[in-house]
Amino acid sequence: MKLLLLAIPLLLVAVPGASGELEVFTNSKVYSTDHTLQMYGTGLPGENLVIRLFAPDDTIAKFDQITTGEDGSFNYNLLIWPDPSTNFPYGTYTVEVISTEQNGISERADIKFTSTTDLVGVPVERNLNTLVFAPETAAVHQSVRVFVQVTSDGLLIGNDPMLLLRTSHVHLPSGLSISLSNTFKTLHQGLYYVDYVTREEGTHVFHVVAFNQGTTSHGSSATNVLSQDIGGISDQIISLNSILDETSGELDTLKSEIESFDTTLARASIQIDENIGTIGEASSQLNALLLPIIASIGLIVALQITILARRR
């Protein structure tokens, strides 16, 4: 009985740690340059807490470790917001406080760093964008590389694509959908790609779904799959151009021969004209020779007729 009575108080002491006593608050939801980001809340007495500030691209912009007071409370100025830069751009940040003694439980809070602290004009929300880049045309049964860019508040997100893009898929011309989960690879922080082998001819729509910190973004791009790719068509065009070049050369040769024939005809025409002129001159000369002879013959005939007439 004494052993049981001793065990009960020990169990009662362990309960507070198991219940997860951790509360985190910030002094504002929206901050601008020169404003102080103040963290306060409660944990276990004398507990070590890890504070991390995540930038919009999920990288750690600030890291600190503090210890709670005897009553478990803490109040800590994490940072004074600097001028916006590549390290501290405008956007939605996440503050996370992790307990080192309560099985690693954590609390998170989203805040906004912007040029104004107006809560009405600047809602605390994440702007997640997904862009998909796919070739316009491809050949069936060939690999197609599709690129994806995911940004949050304009910054590239470097999460694991198996988690970030796990519900992405491709719509086939037949109406079927094929999952692209576990197929994306990381090219660079926030840039991913997938190599997909086409199965059908027609339009393939790549539908990429990005999910990050409770926010979903969609992006899509279409590829028209043909029986052969542009490379094959280009080869045919090159072959056709070669045939056309040969035909053009033959036409040039024929044109040259025709021009030569025209020259020959022109020369023949000139020669014919010259021959006609020569014939004309010869005819004139012949006429000049024949006229006296004909006149002489006529005179002789006339004399003979006169002689015959006298004899009668």
Image: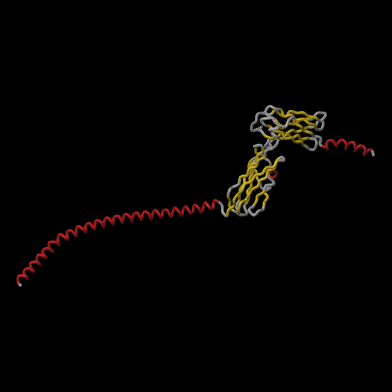
- Residue 11 position by quadrant: top right
Give the color scheme: rainbow, by chain, secondary structure or one colour.
secondary structure
Give the vertical position of 63 relative to 268 (above or below): above
Left or right of residue 79: residue 138: left
Q: Is residue 241 visible?
A: yes
The location of residue 178, given as percent across then percent down, is 67, 51
Give the vertical position of 93 relative to 160 (above or below): above
The location of residue 52, given as percent across then percent down, is 72, 34
Left or right of residue 256: residue 57: right
Q: What residue is shown at x 95% (from left), y 39% (from top)?
A: 1
Q: Is residue 160 visible?
A: no
Left or right of residue 223: residue 55: right
The location of residue 188, given as percent across then percent down, is 63, 41
Q: What residue is shown at x 67% (from left), y 53% (from top)?
A: 176
Query: Which residue, as the protein is rendered here, is positioned at the far left?
Result: 311
The quadrant of the picture occupied by the C terminus is: bottom left
